[in-house]
Image (tube, rainbow, N blue to C red):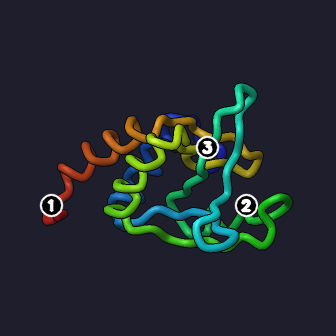
Amino acid sequence: MQEANDQVRLEFFVNEIVKNEAVWLLQAEDGLFAMVEDAEGNSYVSVWPTKAECEAVAKDEWSGYQAESMEIKEFLNWLKELKDDDVRIGVYPDINGRILPFESLGLKKLIETELKEKPNFI
């Protein structure tokens, strides 16, 4: 999946986190997550759809980080907080560190739209 085009990677990401009701992050210590910065100085919290793909990038500057899951409901609430802190989301970084950049509320809306189609999600 890492070599797929951006649209395919995004659809896979959203489908996986909705199906599993969780997103994966790399955490160094409680509350300190792997982040990247773009050329304009924007900060992005990195998130992955699966534990295996999250763990696969825990090297170099992220060595020592541990893959941690976050329930999707908590993640959706957290996205509102990140917006207030002007932090964006780096969706599904590949092995070269390339992300799909999202404003936190834009990603929240995309996930919530997909959740509406999931039966029995409360």
Q: Residue at x 35, y 54 (%)?
A: 76
Task: Point out the tag, 2 or 1, that comes first from the N-terminus.
Answer: 2
**Image height of 54 relative to 111, above or below:** below
Specify whether 21 is left or right of 46. left
Q: Which residue is mark 2?
A: 57
Q: Residue at x 16, y 64 (%)?
A: 122
Q: Which residue ends up furthest to the front in the rendered image?
A: 84
Specify whether 9 is left or right of 107. right
Q: Which residue is mark 1?
A: 119
Q: CA distance from mark 1 to mark 3?
A: 31 Å
Task: Point out the tag, 3 or 2, that comes first from the N-terminus.
Answer: 3
**Image height of 63 relative to 110, above or below:** below
Task: Point out the tag, 1 or 3, that comes first from the N-terminus.
Answer: 3
Q: Which residue is mark 3?
A: 44
Give the residue type at disc 1.
Pro
Residue 11: image location, x then y, percent = 42, 44
Residue 64: image location, x then y, percent = 78, 73
